Amino acid sequence: MPRTAIKGQALADFLLEFDSDVDDKALVVLQPPRNEESLEEFPHPWWILHVDGVVNNGGAGAGIVLVSPEGHHLMTAIHFKFYVTNNDAQYEALINGLKIALEMGVRNLITRSDSELVVNQVNGGFQTQGPRTELYLRCTQLLIEKFQVVRLECISREKNSNADALAKMGSQQEAVLLGSILLEIQKIPSIPEIEAMQVDETPKEIWMSPLLAYIHKGTLHEDKFKARRLHYQAARYVVYDEILYKRGFNQPLLRCVDEEEGNYI
């Protein structure tokens, strides 16, 4: 980890050690003069977005606080009517917050969340696991590309208390409007549903099928040669908890017969 704080302190100590004749001493950060291109690089003011997602016994919700450059707060609470995990709720809060910022015409945005996992996944520090998380990440990246500049920062929950309170309010099924706080009901996820492939549950013949049929029901092949070979082969296997095991060399070859049905088990 780079120890930037110590580097900055060393620079300050260095400047204080070499005194000068100037009476008014100050630590000044020098910046290169801006030309016309640099002034047009970020012409729009910066907005601040706080987001948080919560999943509890009452349900799931998200809290969004969008702060304008003048200090005005636009607060939104969202209640989810579909199943989400805690990480999904964090992504839903971030996606909805970005959508609100785009509707307000924001170009430069500082986004703050207390989810270290989501922040690092979007910034590229952590890898995603699972197709659902990858869809959430891709949806977030597509929204970020519509801004001029977006900075995503991870903050503590104490510094994200307003968004956290809104998320808890939105998670309740009977949440009410409090003053100018907008409550929205989201019935479907922000990402498309993952198509599940239908699995053919029809049992297929494998090399273990004749062994299991002989051990459980005593079924033999019509061919005498194959039936004799299956009879000797089955003596080297045993079924335990519906799982077929092969006997070791140091174990006796034992077979038990069900006295009631007369089948080998």
Image (cartoon, grey):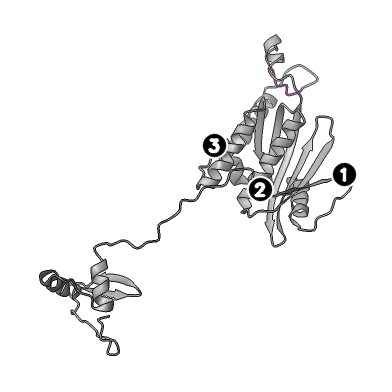
Dot 2 falls on a residue whose secondary structure is loop
77, above or below 4, in the image: below
Dots 1, 3 in contact, CB < 8 A: no
Within 10 Å of the Cα at label 2, are there few (<14), some (14-19), or many (20+) other Cα atoms? few
Which percent across, then down, holds residue 99? 70, 36
Q: CA distance from mark 3 to mark 2?
A: 27 Å
**Residue of label 2:** 188
Q: Is residue 244 visible?
A: yes
Q: Quadrant of the C terminus?
A: bottom left
199, above or below 16, in the image: below
Please check the rendered image and state whether residue 30 is part of the magenta-colored stretch, yes or no: yes
* Camera-side mark, 1 or 3: 1
Q: Quadrant of the N terminus?
A: top right
Name the residue located 16 percent from the left edge and 71 percent from the top edge: 222
Name the residue located 74 percent from the left edge and 19 percent from the top edge: 43
Specify the amino acid type for callout 2.
Ile
Please check the rendered image and state whether residue 182 is part of the magenta-colored stretch, yes or no: no
**Residue of label 1:** 180
**Residue of label 3:** 124
Range drawn in magenta: 26-31
* Camera-side mark, 2 or 1: 2
